[in-house]
């Protein structure tokens, strides 16, 4: 194939095309890099929020309180049944003592107030971990069980988390679309400008019978090279920022469930250059198509 | 090789550049198109290159019909033509050798041979010493030679040279013309436009066609021009 045999020629042409407007091309690389950096930030935010939501979803739980008539054995039977309901991850009995101890932990120094009670004021209950998607069904199933007096859920909080996640997803999609369009406009404009600057050469090659693929390939390569350089710059910045952020967050806010750092960095290191190549190809094709 | 039947060319501004041209040129012919500036010589070459299309009539070049609808095939046809432009159309920022090689890279020539063929073409136009010189640093005559080397290295069936002797002194003009004659063989036709008729009077086996106000008239030689139509 001629394209492969001429690769040395094409690379020299790419160097010529880029050198012809070096400053403009460098600024475009920086611009593309910053836009892709923004995309990297959004992807990172998306990953972290997804992890938080995933953790919350895994830890979503409801509490079911028994009637006073329910005996310990009956409670065990009921828990066995609850465990068999679809959408229940795990159900276990929390005894009065454990409930008291938990409240002491929650109150901390204020736990002294519990000493005012002659008896343990807390009752035993069932702690049920559920799949958030099945929350309504599970709540309904447990509420209608005989021996259950009250079911406490944190539905409002969980629904808010779900809404927040949907909002974040929406923002991420919008940013990705904006990044895509902006990069396409920058690159297609650059390619058109390069084609204009090289119009005499292109015209000569056409008169010599060169096919459009031969003429256009160096422009396609230069578009890819420019966006890829921007993508690599963005990746370097984002890797640096994530490393710095993780070191700060894991020390100061240990309770925030962060995604695995290595996986996140690998994902971004593959994704950003891949997106930049894709946008480079698309932008160059638009530029070439418009200048045909 | 070239067959024109009743070909006319009228530009968009209404100028009639060629009028009812009927002619035939065979492989191995050397044809001079002479005439004053603006007579239609370059317009005829542009038609042969597929840079313009006949307004009326039928034009076939190396078996390819020259019409707007055939634009894709005309691009392929150009691979078989070695054009030498009046203004050379060399690519700045590249050496003489690069320019010659650039004209061959998309042809069916094995990549490994391209450099060798280009060097041979440069030797043939006596520019070995300048093969690594950027073309913008060459003289007019040297640039003309690079353009010729680029055209002939492609081993074309048809060489079209537009005013190759323009701006050259007598000696250099004769050298360039002799060089171009040397490329005529049984498979290659060479068509040269020039208004310097004194340079071509004694060229043997050449056909001279005078172009005047878009009409073609044969002065001497073997090419067939239907003058009764003009």
Image: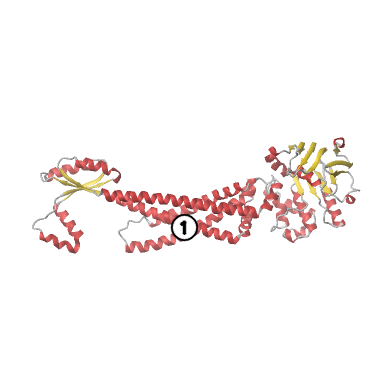
- Residue A207 vs residue A3: left or right? right
**Residue A96: image location, x then y, percent:** 14, 52
- Residue A131 vs residue A227: left or right? left
**Image height check: is A261 above or below A130?**
below
Q: How is the image coloured?
A: secondary structure
Residue B75 lies in quadrant = top right
**Residue B134: image location, x then y, percent:** 72, 60
Q: Residues within 10 Å of mark 1 (few under 14, many from 20)?
A: many
- Residue A87 vs residue A232: left or right? left
Q: Label 1: chain?
A: A
Instruction: Return the residue nearer the eye: B106 or A117.
Output: A117
**Image height check: is B3 above or below A40?**
above
Whether residue A274 appears in this view of the structure is no
Residue B51 lies in quadrant = top right
Instruction: Return the residue nearer the eye: A66 or B149.
Output: A66
**What residue would you read off at disc 1?**
A37
**Residue B30: image location, x then y, percent:** 84, 44
Whether residue A46 appears in this view of the structure is yes
């Amino acid at each position: 194939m001629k394209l492969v045999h001429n690769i040395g020629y094409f690379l020299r042409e790419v160097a010529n095309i880029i050198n012809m407007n070096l400053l403009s091309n460098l600024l475009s690389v920086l611009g593309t890099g910053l836009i892709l950096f923004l995309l990297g930030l959004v992807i990172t935010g998306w990953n972290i929020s997804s992890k938080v939501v995933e953790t919350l979803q895994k830890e979503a739980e409801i509490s079911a309180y028994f009637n006073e008539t329910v005996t310990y054995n009956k409670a065990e039977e009921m828990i066995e049944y609850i465990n068999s309901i679809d959408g229940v991850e795990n159900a276990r009995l929390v005894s009065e003592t454990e409930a008291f101890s938990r409240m002491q932990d929650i109150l901390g120094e204020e736990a002294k107030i519990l000493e005012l009670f002659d008896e343990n004021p807390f009752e035993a209950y069932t702690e049920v971990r559920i799949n958030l998607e099945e929350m309504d069904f599970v709540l309904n199933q447990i509420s209608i069980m005989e021996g259950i007096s009250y079911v406490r859920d944190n539905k409002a909080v969980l629904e808010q988390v779900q809404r927040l996640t949907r909002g974040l997803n929406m923002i991420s999609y919008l940013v990705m679309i904006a990044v895509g369009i902006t990069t396409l406009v920058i690159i297609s404009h650059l390619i058109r400008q390069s084609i204009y600057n090289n119009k005499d050469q292109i015209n000569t090659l056409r008169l010599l019978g060169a096919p459009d693929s031969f003429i256009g390939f160096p422009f396609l390569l230069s578009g890819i090279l420019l966006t890829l350089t921007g993508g690599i710059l963005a990746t370097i910045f984002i890797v640096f920022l994530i490393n710095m952020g993780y070191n700060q967050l894991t020390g100061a806010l240990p309770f925030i469930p962060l995604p695995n750092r290595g996986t996140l960095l690998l994902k971004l290191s593959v994704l950003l250059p891949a997106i930049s190549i894709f946008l480079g190809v698309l932008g160059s094709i638009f530029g070439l198509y418009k200048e045909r | 090789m070239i067959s024109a039947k009743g070909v006319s060319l009228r530009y968009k501004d209404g100028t009639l550049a060629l009028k009812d041209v009927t002619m035939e040129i065979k492989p191995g012919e050397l044809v001079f198109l002479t005439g004053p500036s603006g007579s239609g010589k370059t317009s005829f070459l542009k038609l042969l290159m597929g840079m313009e299309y006949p307004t009326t009539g039928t034009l076939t070049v190396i078996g390819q019909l020259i019409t707007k609808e055939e634009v894709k095939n005309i691009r392929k046809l150009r691979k078989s033509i070695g054009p030498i432009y009046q203004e050379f159309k060399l690519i700045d920022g590249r050496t003489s050798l690069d320019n010659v090689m650039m004209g061959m890279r998309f042809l069916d020539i094995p990549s490994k041979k391209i450099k060798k063929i280009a060097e041979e073409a440069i030797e043939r136009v006596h520019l070995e010493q300048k093969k690594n010189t950027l073309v913008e640093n060459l003289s007019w005559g040297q640039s003309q030679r690079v353009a010729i080397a680029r055209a002939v290295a492609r081993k074309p069936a048809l060489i079209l040279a537009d005013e190759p002797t323009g701006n050259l002194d007598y000696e250099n003009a004769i050298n360039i013309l002799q060089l171009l004659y040397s490329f005529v063989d049984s498979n290659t036709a060479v068509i040269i436009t020039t208004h310097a008729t004194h340079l071509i009077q004694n060229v043997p086996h050449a056909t001279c066609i005078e172009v005047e106000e878009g009409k073609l008239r044969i002065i001497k030689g073997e090419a067939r021009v239907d003058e009764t139509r003009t």
